[in-house]
Amino acid sequence: MTKPTQYPINPDLQVQGALSDNERLKTQSQHLRGTITTDLQNEITGGFTGDNFLLIRFHGMYQQDDRDIRAERAEQKLEPLHNVMLRARMPGGIIKPEQWLAIDKFASEKTLYGSIRLTTRQTFQFHGVFKPNIKPMHQMLNSIGIDSIATAGDVNRNVLCTSNPVESVLHQQAYEWAAKISEHLLPKTRAYAEIWLDEEKVETTETEPVLGDSYLPRKFKTTVVIPPHNDVDVHANDLNFVAIAENGQLVGFNVLVGGGLAMTHGDKTTYPRRAEDFGFISLEHVLKVAEHVVTVQRDYGDRVNRKNAKTKYTIDRIGVETFKQEVEKRVGVAFQPSRPYEFTHRGDRFGWVEGIDGKHHLTLFIENGRLLDYPGKPLKTGVSEIAKIHKGDFRMTANQNLIIAGVALADKAQIEALARAHGLLEDSVTEQRKNSMACVSMPTCPLAMAEAERYLPTLVTHVEGILAKHGIAEDHIILRVVGCPNGCGRAMLAEAGLVGRGPGKYNLYLGGNTAGTRIPKLYLDNVAEAEILATLDQLIGRWSLERNAGECFGDFVIRVGVVAEVKVSKTDFHA
Amino acid sequence: MPFASLNALTSPLSAQQVQDLQKLVSQLNPIQQAWVSGFLAGSAQTAGVQLPSVAAASAAPSVLTILFASQTGNAKGVAGKLKAAAEQLGLSVNLQDIASYKTNGLAKEQHLIIVTSTYGEGEPPESAVSFHKFLYGKKATQLPQLNFAVLGLGDSSYEFFCQTAVDFDTQLAKLGANRLQAPALLDVDYDSGAASWQAEVLAKFQPLLQTAPQAATPAAAASSGHAYSKQQPFVAELSVNQKITGRTSTKDVRHIEISLADSGLTYQPGDALGVYFQNDPALVQAILTATGIDPTSVVHLDAAGEVTIERALIDSLELTQSYPSFLEKYATSTGNSELQSIAADKTAAREFLATRQTLDVILQYPGSLTAQQLVDSLRKQQPRLYSIASSQAEVGEEVHLTVGVVRYDAFGASHLGGASGYLAERLAEGESVRVFVEHNDNFRLPDHDTPVIMVGPGTGIAPFRAFLQERDNAGATGQNWLFFGNPHFTQDFLYQVELQDYLKRGVLAKLDVAFSRDQAQKVYVQDKLVAKGAEVWDWLQQGAHVYICGDGSKMARDVHEALVQIAVNHGGLSSDDAAEYFEQLRESKRYQKDVY
């Protein structure tokens, strides 16, 4: 391995002070190894101890427990029902049928919840894997060509790519870049192979040329997006490559840097923020640009205060121009002026579409992304039945839905019949439901403060009722519910976003738009369902009567002054 | 206290003599006090208090030796009564735990009664293993000088009922000793049987023994007059009933806390708590309905006199454990010939009863009988003994138990254990339960410096929780190593959080667990022991004590075999020598079991 390239550092642009404890643990981890192997042999606890609790995140896992029974187990003198959640690395979310069948089997047989969860990171998660099954899980994944390296932790995580099977040529090119960027920014440590795959320890003086030996200051998210779709929600991501095509061929990218939605309740130095457009680059510079947006953030991100460690705060602290120039200096290329592009929508196109290559693609709405066999709706079995006969591939979308891609005309009927027979394709699903989203939250996510996934179906039913009451049942608002302000469900880009505060209590944010290019603003603080529904009833009622032609709900509430527009997050969001 | 109130003004003794006497008496246990009082009275009748050696010499041949081999304390209790009755007859008695009896003295012994229980598959109780081995071994000599009788306590629901008593009786006779009285083989309701056998056997020994001086009122009686006991249980409050297995566990294990406040009861780690219980009123109702007996019918019970049958069945009689005598008596009363033939065949009866509670038998063979006949067919309810799971150093006046709830479905109905069902389901927190402390000197921690290895799968963890609490509070420096096992890690890791804390704080040096059903290949505590064999052997070489608690039918035997294997593998012993090694450990109290 090559030593990390050293660049002259301007200490005035760095945050000085005692480093956060996470910096110590990363530095001392021997490149993410820690004592994970010892913990795997510890039969006294189902959890991981000390630093390993956080180190396993770099390997794509979070230690969780069944929070529904945490108190009960404490009374039983039992530790929490520790298990791990695994998030796979699937750049662009493409998975083959044979891979699907393997993960389907594992989910059924070896996980507490028996489900496959499609997520906003365009991948799948296993929830509820007990310690003895962790290594077999990684080995199973490895046997089908999947890993979970760096899907969590202070690294570049799973790289998203717009799920657009119609523009098949462009999508293929964009997808390949997503995969290449993912590989390029991966940790180079062999810790994953040694710990989980029992691969031999090779004597090397390991270094991390891109990420650095103490890795990044904070999580880092990257997308490749093909306008006009903004399904990946670029403004939720640190680094975005906006595909620019000429005559159906990819020629380069506009680079958007510094988006991110996470914040901390009560901490006004934290806020969701849109990404900044650095300009256009041609294809040959993609990997270098990706690398050096990362290295600039690596060198100048705040390692003292983790709450301000993400790229968006670095940019606000050192300035967009400084950040951009530093990247240009390191790459040795200047950004060209941005090429024009427009985002028009974020939702998936449900049902069948035909691609320019003549293949057919069926997008299925998967409520909450949760594939499980429900009474009368055996969704998970349905997908596996399709996988058994499907000759194309599956594409997990950033909206937690599933595309059965690359179906020959002759196979359409059979696939559709299977989808309908298993409740995967239902004509009665409203636009509102299709445009609503929640993070996982309770009972597995340790950060959750309120219900999200389990609450969403009920909430949507209420909102459907409100829309119908005002005579606009066919309309919808982008509605998102998250259990905490950390950002997984991207509520901070919704027209109406609920962010968990406590059991049954949420903050209500209003004013995002359909294209996902505006941050909403706090409207109600720490309120229960009744007040949220009463408010939505009143505002949707006004919207139905007073809106301009084609005016979305988020634009409306800003125009009539319900909330002020957030233009510059740092100054406007908490104002 | 009689001796405390003694002074020079109210006695013929001088102040100095009073002081000396009080000093001496304070060092004597009740048995010694009784003996001394008898000795002094006897020698005063002859020539004043001069030559103790003469008295001792003349007393020696006249002594009746009573050995008890107790597992749960019952044999010890019967032996104690026997001694008191013998002393009332003026006999001189040497009452001793068989564990501490010097077997080389047997050749000189003249008058011997053994009271023994049996446990497991016909094995002697822990305390009697050495004696049993000696009798059957090469060192045993002919015993023509010996008059003996044996009383056995057992449970007829086990195949090898009173086997140890049978063994002692047979082998002593074989060695030429004179059987003075046929052995009593008594079931769990042994009280009246023991009393009548006692009267008979003492009548036979009395003429053979020289008349010893009449014993004065034993001091022991005075001091134990107000103490709570098995006969006079303390009415305690159940303060906590907490399930400690997870919600998907196949087992229901309860952590029970009972308050002993103001009882004066004390216990040590290793002791057991006796629990009296009430049978399930619904079960009683079902039995009465099935037999067509009016719940208000008045019946006679030896202990309680005239009561309604409903109260008798709830409070006094055994319904949840099955036993052959019920089968016999019920079959006879109802005149059911099929059941009679089952009852007549011991093997068939045992198999039949293995899965059936009283109600199952009645439902399968309904018949009519009188209320009194039903009552007479049932034996007296016995309190259940639970190994205590706490140390008073930690919990003060509380006592904790780890109770596995017996619950199973059979014959189309759910079945619940008597005491475990009472504690777990029928007794609310704050309600009363009758308890007593059963001491167990055969399960004791060593001194603070000695390392201990504890093997306690399932509810066998109970006394080790007490051990750990004790050693933690004492700041004991001896290292502690616990082996625990159960079916599933996530559901059945009893006291997991406490054990994790002990491990973290170093109170537990090591904790090894075996969760048998978490993988295809079943893993048990004995497998974990073998896997850690080298270290186990090291600990043994450093003087570690080994304790086993839990299931006696299989686990304790498998663990024993694992230990023997370790001595072979890591100590280089032959398997005979390895077995002998643990035999020696057992004799020196370094290897103790509390199994059931």
Image (cartoon, coloured by chain):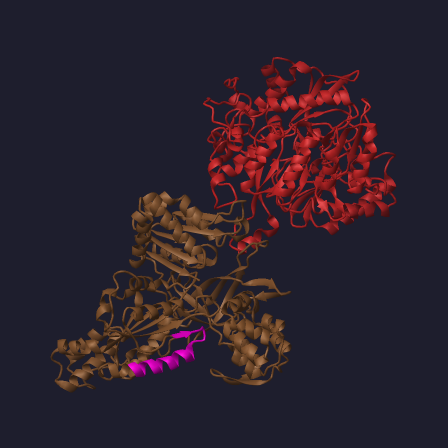
Q: Is residue A319 visible?
A: no
Residue B247, horizontal then vertical, whole percent? 59, 55
Residue A321, horizontal then vertical, whole percent? 63, 20
Of the 4 image quadrants, the one containing the N terminus of chain B is bottom left
Q: Is residue A289 above or below residue A201?
A: above
Viewer-side residue, B421 vs B72: B72
Q: Residue at x 35, y 54 (%)?
A: B546
Of the 4 image quadrants, the one containing the C terminus of chain B is bottom left
Viewer-side residue, B31 vs B501: B31
Q: Colour of chain B?
A: brown
Q: Is residue B95 visible?
A: yes
Which quadrant of the view contains residue B129?
bottom left
Q: Which residues are magenta?
A: B184-204
Residue B104, horizontal then vertical, whole percent? 23, 65
Q: How many marks?
A: 0
Viewer-side residue, B352 vs B15: B352
* Majority secondary structure in the magenta region: helix
Q: Residue at x 25, y 61 (%)?
A: B139
Residue A543, horizontal then vertical, whole percent? 84, 41
Q: Is residue A342 above or below residue B524?
A: above
Q: Residue at x 74, y 23 (%)?
A: A171
